[in-house]
Image (cartoon, rainbow, N blue to C red):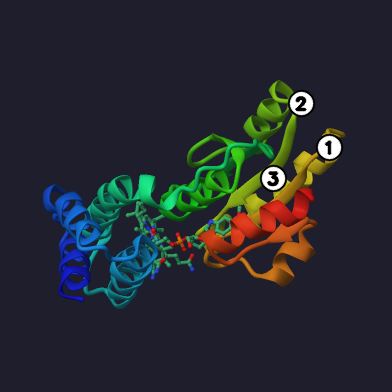
Amino acid sequence: MAKLEAIAQAIEAGKIKIVGGLVAEALADNLDPLIILNQGMIQTMSIVGDKFKRGDIFVPEMLIAAKAMKKGVEVLKPHLAGQADLSLGTCIIGSVAGDMHDIGKNLVAMMIESAGFEVIDLGVDVPAETFIKTIKEHPEVKLVAFSALLTTTMPAMKASVAAVKDSGLHGFKIIVGGAPITQDYAVQIGADGYASDAGSAAVTAKQLIA
Ligand code: B1M
């Protein structure tokens, strides 16, 4: 547990240079990668978010913590991904227009990939038109995944889902998620599926295309 605490402290303090090494040490000590991710890293980002909300820290501190978390995830990634040898199809994923948050979206992409999908990650601040263009370029696509972390980008998610559905393109399912998104909202905007975290996103992704 001391290792998890050290990882959490390094992420919160934005110590980008040491996080990777600490995660590698925790793995060498046979700590479960999912426990490292959930208890050492994701929980820490919640603490960072709460401090930001209270005004104890500001955007630069939040950004540097996010960068430190990314370094840790890089080291963790090969240990989280399974060896799926059969492709379930292509999944296009991105954070919706106006949304720059990508840590959660990257985790979702990683878990969906490890479930057996080929993932095309469009990154952050992705306009609906880019999703549509990419679907046209990849007619084999089975899943389109939208992430939003801000209440202010929820309308962009709604508009993106509507634009993709109105495009007349078909043969794929739509999955949505992100901290402010709920099952009810997903239904309301016409998505086929919703997941609250990266693990359940992979499970839902497989169920949607079954
Ligand atoms: Co931002 N930010 N941020 N931020 N940020 C939040 C989201 C916030 C809750 C902080 C707070 O006030 N407590 C708040 C939003 C409030 C609201 O909308 N109600 C907020 C704000 C206000 C802002 C700015 C507006 C701040 C400002 O500039 N004044 C600004 C907006 C920028 C923009 O997007 N246009 C901003 C900027 C940033 C940084 C750039 C500094 C940085 C992001 C860096 C990056 O991502 N590369 C940042 C960070 C780090 C956060 C917090 C602290 C952490 C987010 C995170 O990475 N969490 C966040 C507070 C918090 O979450 N507690 C906060 C860890 C991650 C693993 O969890 O992203 O929730 P999460 O992903 C989960 C699930 O949501 C789900 O699975 C993931 C893994 O389990 N999920 C999906 C996500 N996508 C999914 C898709 C799916 C399914 C599940 O299917 C497709």
Amino acid at the residue labelled 1: Gly
Crowding near the residue tagged with mark 2, few <14, some 14–19, many ≥20 C-alpha atoms within 10 Å: few
Relative to 41, is 24 above or below? above
**Of pointers 1 and 2, the one earlier in the residue sequence:** 2
Q: Residue 168: x and y, percent?
A: 87, 34
Q: Say which quarter of the image contains residue 130.
A: top right
**Of pointers 3 and 1, the one earlier in the residue sequence:** 3
- Which label was assigned to residue 139? 2
Ligand 1 located in image quadrant: bottom left
Foreground disc of the pair 3, 2: 2
Amino acid at the residue labelled 2: Pro
SS label for mark 3: helix
Residue corresponding to mark 1: 171
- Which label was assigned to residue 27? none
Q: Say which quarter of the image contains residue 2.
A: bottom left
Residue corresponding to mark 3: 160
Disc 3 Cβ-to-ligand 1 distance below 8 Å: no
Q: Residue 173: x and y, percent?
A: 77, 47
